[in-house]
Image (cartoon, rainbow, N blue to C red):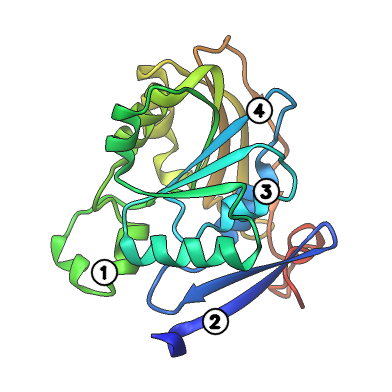
Amino acid sequence: MENMKKILTLNQEGKQIKIMQRKDMFCISLDTILLINFIKIRPSTKKIVDFGTNNAVLPILLANKFDGDIIGIEIQKPAVDLAIENVELNNLHNRITIVHDDIKNYCAKNLEKVDLIICNPPFFPLLEKSKTKLQPLKVVARHEVHINLEQIIASAAKLLKAKGKLVMVHTVERINELLLLLQKYQITPKILQIVYPKVNQAANVFLIEAGFLANPGMIVLPPLICHNDNNTYIDEIAKWYKL
């Protein structure tokens, strides 16, 4: 198993963050980098929960700009073990707690409300169960095997404080579905940004911040274009990677 591991180094405001990854599991993608750049930590924020933390990259990166407690919830035991290893690798065991649990169960039994929930969810509905036999650890990260979009939104509504924030990245193909589900569970979209691979290409993902029991009104940020014409990342994104 050790030969399947590899350390990725990310640059965050001049500080190097090391993330251990496994080839047979979900690895850090551009969606991760987009989401971490999009998240805004307000002074009133005391506790953050990461739905589906996987290898704990989001909590680890957030810990560099947030002084409070961070909880990462993960259902896959191999991912939990890797997340704990990464927390130790970055000496953050006093700041970050990794919980091995189903998000739905965790939110049903925890009464303490939180200020911010972040989530890089599975993008794709599970239409063919046979796909789960192929690289099962990756399938769970990308397909709705254990939790679907509505269950994520419903769970967030149970755990958030009034006006607490939910921040997500998702595919544009499901933007209408997500907006309708937010409305159903009284979570109001507040900030939206559409992401494009290149100039003159169709958008592929979007970033959204929404507030539970918040006042209406949404800001749509300028579009974010990820790649230059030569397929390199724009400077804003490239600086996060160790080149």
Within 10 angstroms of label 1, few (less than 14), some, or many (20 or more) residues?
few
Residue 60: image quadrant is bottom right
Of the numbered discs 3 and 2, the one sitting upstream in the chain is 2
Of the numbered discs 3 and 1, the one sitting upstream in the chain is 3
Of the numbered discs 2 and 4, the one sitting upstream in the chain is 2
Residue 240: where, in percent of width, then height? 74, 63
- SS class, disc 1: helix
Residue 63 is tagged as 3
Query: Which of the two discs, 3 and 2, sits closer to the camera?
Result: 3
Q: Is residue 201 above or below residue 160?
A: below
Residue type beneath disc 1? Pro
- Left or right of 133: which side holds 140? right
The Cα atoms of the two marked residues, 2 and 4, are separated by 33 Å
In the rendered image, which residue does mark 4 sit on? 45
Front-most of residues 88 and 138: 88
**Quadrant containing the N terminus in the rendered view:** bottom left
Residue 214: where, in percent of width, then height? 55, 13
Q: Residue furthest top?
A: 215
Residue 28 appears in the rendering: no
- SS class, disc 2: strand
The Cα atoms of the two marked residues, 1 and 2, are separated by 19 Å
Residue type beneath disc 4? Thr
In the rendered image, which residue does mark 2 sit on? 6
Query: Which of the two discs, 1 and 2, sits closer to the camera?
Result: 2
In the rendered image, which residue does mark 1 sit on? 136
Front-most of residues 87 and 103: 87
- SS class, disc 4: loop
Q: Residue at x 45, y 23 (%)?
A: 112
